[in-house]
Image (tube, helix red, strand yellow):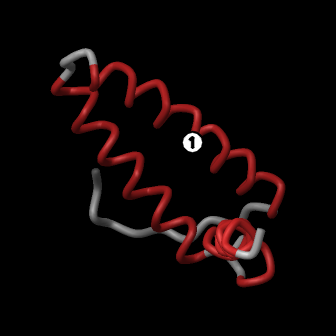
Amino acid sequence: MLDEKQKLEISQDELALIEAALHTQSKILGVQASAGGSKALARLNDVKRVLATIDIQKPARSRTDKRGMGSIFRMSRLFG
């Protein structure tokens, strides 16, 4: 991957589409990597790194708290 950074102007919908496509790609690469593909594993790591960068740089209002709902469900199991 290139270390050079470039700013792009894209809409929130376009960013969501790119992010969804990368999630799909990571699932495909995960299957390929589990079948022994070393190139797939390297590519999977690259895709995960890009997804993490997107998540960090997304505006706060479009970010979802991944722990929030899980914590609620775990607590509801504790209390019956």
Q: Amino acid at mark 1?
A: His
Q: Name the quadrant of the C terminus.
A: bottom right
67 or 37: which is nearer to us?
67
Residue at the extreme top of the image, as rendered: 35
Q: Quadrant of residue 43?
A: top left
Q: Is residue 37 visible?
A: yes
At a point 57% along the width and 68% down the height, the residue shown is: 55
At a point 83% along the width and 55% down the height, the residue shown is: 13
Percent x, y for residue 9? 70, 66
- Check the image and report above or below for 55 versus 46: below
Q: Secondary structure at mark 1?
A: helix
Percent x, y for residue 76? 76, 71
Residue identified by numbered label 1: 23
Percent x, y for residue 79? 74, 75
Q: Is residue 63 visible?
A: no
Residue at the extreme front of the image, as rendered: 80
At a point 21% along the width and 20% down the height, the residue shown is: 37
Residue at the extreme bottom of the image, as rendered: 60
- Check the image and report above or below for 71 versus 73: below
Percent x, y for residue 6? 48, 68
Circle 1 crowding by C-alpha within 10 Å: few under 14, some 14–19, many from 20 = some
52 or 73: which is nearer to us?
73
For this view, does 49 lie left or right of residue 58? left
At a point 44% along the width and 56% down the height, the residue shown is: 50
Q: How many marks?
A: 1
For this view, does 12 lie left or right of residue 20? right
